Image (tube, helix red, strand yellow):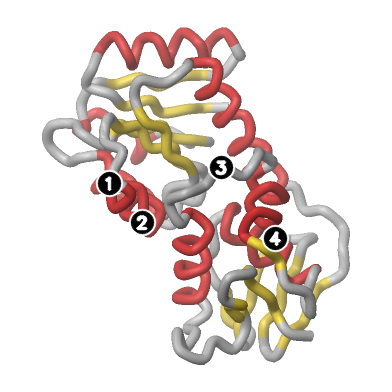
Amino acid sequence: MNILVLDDEKEIADLVELYLKNENYDVYKTYTSKDALEIVDTVKLDMAILDVMVLGKNGFEILKYIREKNLNFPVIMLTAKIEAQDKIEGLTLGADDYITKPFNPLELVARVKSALRRYTKYNEKQEDEKIFINGLEIDEKTHQCLLYEKLVDLTPLEFDILLYLAKNRGQVVSSEELFEKVWKEKYLDSNNTIMVHIRRIREKLKENTREPKFIKTVWGVGYKIEK
């Protein structure tokens, strides 16, 4: 597994590299955004860990560049900031996870493993039936989503969220349940993580935000897809 690590704080980048190499990951470490962009263009990456506040292009800009190239590998953002707006910005651009400094390196490794499990599962082609919902086709075997026969470009995390809701269509799924089933972690979210991802999925499904056709919001409870 190839992992890009970008942080202009040398000590942090070196520490992250050490812990990831101890888990037998191949680490492409850099302290500059210029080198990070070159790595994105030349290396087949499986993940990126990006510091938000770096000189030149910041972490958000690099994340946007990655997603605009239709690269769907997981991206974890590192930042000293804790404002909810910063987290929402990263998630809106397509980040999979967000870790604030200072952090426990073992927690970072756990988050890396969790994100890579989702990514690997996404690319594994499991054998399950297709789900059809009013022009929406979700194929768990190929991990593809089609809307009126046109491919919807979802990240692995977005696909897992949509698939879980589709498998439980007709039922209201709480944010807590959705987080714990998809992220495989205890729900401690207070910064609208689920809401931001649902919004991104709706945008990609060309949903009317006032009257969504597929993912309905049940206020104060959660989300559901009608049967």
The residues bearing labels 3 and 1 have C-alpha atoms spaced at a distance of 24 Å
Mark sitting on residue 60: 1
Q: Which of marks 3 and 4 is nearer the N terminus?
A: 4
Foreground residue among 80 and 47:
80
Specify whether 66 is left or right of 172: left
> Which residue is located at x 59 percent, y 89 percent?
213
Residue contact between numbered discs 2 and 3, judged by CB atoms under 8 Å: no
Which residue matches tag 3? 188
Q: Which of marks 2 and 4 is nearer the N terminus?
A: 2
Q: What residue type is labelled 2?
A: Leu
Which residue matches tag 2? 93
Nearer mark to the viewer, of 4 and 1: 1
Residue 134 x, y percent position in the rendering: 70, 90
The residues bearing labels 3 and 4 have C-alpha atoms spaced at a distance of 28 Å
Specify whether 82 is left or right of 91: left
Foreground residue among 14 and 86:
86
Quadrant of the drawing holding the C terminus: bottom right
Q: Residues within 10 Å of mark 4 (few under 14, many from 20)?
A: some
Res 81 quadrant in image: top left
- Judged from the image, the secondary structure of the residue bearing numbered disc 3 is loop
Q: Earlier in the sequence, mark 2 or mark 3?
A: 2
Q: Which amino acid does label 3 sit on?
A: Leu
